[in-house]
Amino acid sequence: MATTVTDPPTNTSAGEHLRARVVGGSAIMLLGSIFVGGMNLIYNFAIAHKLGAGQFGHASVTYTLLMLLSSVTLSFQLVCSKFVARSTSEGERAAIYHHLHRRAWMYSVSIGLLLAIASPEISRYLNLPTTVFLRLLAAGIVFYIPLGVRRGLLQGSCDFRALAVNLSLEVVVKLVGAVVLMSLGYGVTGVVGAMTASLIVAYFVAVPPRHTRVVQSTGQAVLQTGFDEGIQAIIFFIGQVIINNLDILLVKHFFNATQAGTYAAVALVGRLVYILSWSVISSMFPLSAQVRSDETSRKSVLGTALALVSSIAAVFTLGAWLAPTNLWQVLLGSGFPAVGRGFYSLLLVLYVITTAVYSLAVVLMTYEISRKIGNVSWLQLVFSGAIIVGIYIFHGNLEQV
């Protein structure tokens, strides 16, 4: 359902207006993402110091499972954001939100139960010492998927400040909870418990405005016209989370706990490139969805997003290359192996470059998804499958992965 957008008097001013909105929204999301990324770094280094490489591997692979399941959460967020951005009234927004929120709860309860039931088999494959980690994670998933709808409402309404605050609150609760529970002797169980608590807190804090909670009857009709777009979003995020996360799961399966923990530490730092890039993409998406019919405005949105993501990638690549070789031992502590000179830096540079290239590709893919139904989601899914096959064939050492 298209929304009529009133454009500024000229194409030039329209482009400047959209560019300013992308930069403004990106600035808010980028600041929030810098805070979230910084807190995540502190979080990862804190639990790495406390747990050591082996136990850190258990904690990181559990978190990676959450990221894999985020394909469902992000699909709901993307669809909600897109339709809210195009909606013509508050009543229509409320209807869209309520319909998707109900669906999200149905999916979350089902997936949470399946994860709890399958926890013994999954724990065995990932070499986890207990099923408690995955059962705690299952409880968090129940709230995590509906949280995607609430964040999609904020994103589609261009309320980037509230969205950034919600993301920041989640990571603060996760960090403080993990530190407190580890200090009480709960180890990995405490880390996973804090992770679950952070999702529950973020869900209840993201409660929508009162007028949005008024149920309207038009939501299902509006969304029925976008069924194919929902499928596209699901396929896109399945491919995305596989590319971003499955390597950690496969390394945990093929390598011992110490090697898996070492790889996870490098990967979680390198993934900051994507986290910061996603903040730009999040602000670009609703604006691109609003201006589908204006070629000049669309090019301004895309060009600005590509420039911002390229800058982020360049800064991180340079930083990874120039980082002192002994920095990792200082940050990770004695619980991680003191391997050859430059080992950690080499892994990080390779990871950052790969992530940077993928981040630029995601800008182009999400831009296309915001405008129309295309084949980019399926192309990405095929590529993610190729990565899985590649790791199964080439896993002689961490550099090959």
Image (cartoon, rainbow, N blue to C red):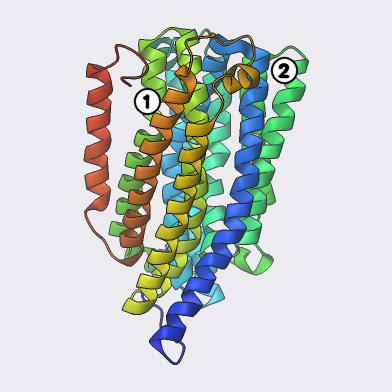
3D distance between C-alphas at marks 1 and 2: 27 Å
Give the mark nearer the N terminus: 1 vs 2. Answer: 2
Question: Relative to the observer, which residue lies in front, 156 or 342?
Answer: 342
Q: Residue at x 54, y 21 (%)?
A: 325
Counting other residues with Cα less than 10 Å from the Cα at mark 2, is it few (<14), some (14-19), or many (20 or more)?
many
Q: Between residues 59 and 228, which one lies in front from this camera angle?
A: 59
Residue 203 makes an appearance in the image: no
Q: Disc number at residue 247?
A: 1
Name which quarter of the figure residue 371 lies in: bottom left
Report the quarter where the N terminus lies: bottom left
Above-or-below relation of 305 to 5: above
Query: Is 38 placed left or right of 99 in the picture?
Result: right
Pick the residue in front: 275 or 227: 275
Question: In the rendered view of the protein, which quadrant contains the C terminus?
Answer: top left
Indicate which disc residue 134 carries: none
The image position of residue 249, as x and y in percent, is 40, 21
Q: Is residue 26 above or below residue 259?
A: below
Q: Which amino acid lies under the numbered mark 1 shown in the image of this protein?
A: Asp
Q: Position of residue 23 (x, y in %)?
A: 53, 66
Which of the two marks, 1 or 2, is nearer to us in this view? Answer: 1
Question: In what element is the residue under mark 2?
Answer: helix
Q: Amino acid at mark 2?
A: Met
- Mark count: 2
Tag 1 near tag 2, CB within 8 Å: no
Please give the label number shown on residue 182.
2
Q: Badge 1: how crowded within 10 Å, few (<14), some, or many (20+)?
A: many
The answer to whether any part of residue 43 appears in the image is: yes
Q: Position of residue 361 (x, y in %)?
A: 33, 50
Image position, residue 171 (x, y; %): 65, 38
SS label for mark 1:
helix
Identify which residue, 204 or 302, lies in the foreground.
302
Q: Residue at x 25, y 17 (%)?
A: 394
